[in-house]
């Protein structure tokens, strides 16, 4: 009997939410280990892995554990025998890497504010929305030319962007709703039968997006 995958992460959406979406899209059976107490992870569970790269999120598959988000996407695509989700050829794989880099820049801008100084957060919010809005505008332009971020077939980076769109639909809806192709893109992923079912499941985390004790927006 094949081992059930275990995804370990904090009990928030954070970096793990696109991975959860990807798992659901692939229809791979999995369980979650959701950490609510830092002491349960630091100095305890993090010591149980024989790796110098131990971190959250992690994906455990029997005796094999994968750390780092992108590595988890790669592993899952191979696990499900759907490597085309990493890019079907060298050109699309290069586009995937490009889009992933741009999403990382978006994340840096947004999370720099989210986990920044709470006393100055409101004053800096407009600048953050302006900066992140430029990234979303570029993605909207991309989606005017193709169904998915890297062409006519979906890849894992589409799930990563979905999460940030979903988060901004709560934080600052106008940033997204003013860009029709982003709305269509978000809806398209949400309407996949397995994703739609997951979004209606009580196990789906609606909030918090980020860690409440430390984040400005959660």
Image: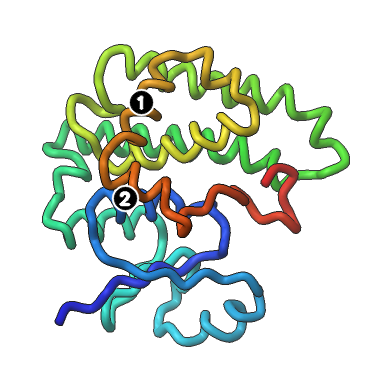
Q: Which mark is residue 3?
A: none
Cα separation, mark 2 vs mark 1, equals: 16 Å
- Left or right: residue 160 versus residue 155 is right
Which of the 4 image quarters holds residue 127? top right
Closest to the observer: 207 or 109?
207
Count of numbered circles in the view: 2
Above or below residue 173? Residue 100 is below
Give the mark nearer the N terminus: 2 vs 1: 2
Answer left or right for 94 relative to 138: left
Tell me which corner region of the image, top left, top right, bottom left or bottom right, holds residue 109.
Answer: top right
Q: Among all residues in the image, which is located at the extreme right? A: 119
Q: Secondary structure at mark 1?
A: helix
Q: Position of residue 5 (x, y in %)?
A: 30, 71
Could you tell me which residue is drawn at 23 percent across and 35 percent down?
154
Taking the spot 58% from the left edge, 20% from the top edge, the residue there is: 175
Label placed on residue 185:
1
Above or below, 38 against 210 in this view is: below
Residue under pointer 2: 22
Residue contact between numbered discs 2 and 1, judged by CB atoms under 8 Å: no
User: Which quadrant does the N terminus fall into?
Assistant: bottom left
Q: Residue at x 37, y 21 (%)?
A: 184
Residue 36, placed above or below residue 132: below
Neighbourhood count class around disc 2 (C-alpha, 10 Å): few under 14, some 14–19, many 20 upward = many
Residue 114 lies in what quarter of the image? top right
- Please, is residue 2 above or below residue 24 in the view? below
The residue that appears at 67% across and 47% down in the rendered structure is 218
Instruction: Where is residue 7? Give x, y as percent.
Output: 40, 67
Classify mark 1: residues with Cα within 10 Å, few (<14), some (14-19) or many (20+).
some
In the visual, does 13 lie left or right of 29?
right
Question: Percent from the top left, x then y, of residue 29?
Answer: 26, 65
Residue 172, image x and y in percent?
64, 26
Dot 2: element: helix
């Amino acid at each position: 009997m094949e081992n059930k995958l275990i995804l370990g992460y904090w009990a928030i959406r954070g970096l793990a939410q696109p991975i959860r979406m990807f798992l659901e899209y692939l229809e791979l059976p999995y369980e979650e280990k959701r950490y609510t107490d830092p002491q349960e992870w630091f100095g305890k569970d993090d010591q149980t892995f024989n790796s110098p790269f131990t971190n959250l999120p992690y994906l455990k598959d029997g005796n094999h554990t994968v750390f780092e988000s992108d590595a988890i996407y790669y592993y899952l695509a191979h696990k499900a025998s759907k490597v085309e989700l990493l890019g079907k050829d060298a050109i699309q794989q290069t586009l995937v890497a490009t889009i992933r880099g741009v999403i990382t820049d978006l994340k840096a801008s947004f999370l720099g504010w989210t986990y920044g100084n709470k006393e100055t957060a409101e004053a800096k919010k407009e600048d953050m929305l302006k900066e992140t809005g430029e990234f979303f505008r570029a993605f909207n332009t991309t989606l005017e030319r193709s169904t998915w971020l890297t062409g006519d077939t979906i890849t894992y980076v589409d799930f990563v962007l979905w999460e940030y769109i979903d988060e901004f639909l709560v934080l600052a809806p106008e940033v997204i709703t003013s860009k029709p192709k982003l709305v269509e893109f978000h809806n398209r992923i949400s309407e996949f039968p397995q994703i739609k079912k997951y979004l209606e499941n009580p196990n789906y985390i609606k909030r918090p997006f980020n860690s409440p004790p430390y984040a400005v927006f959660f």
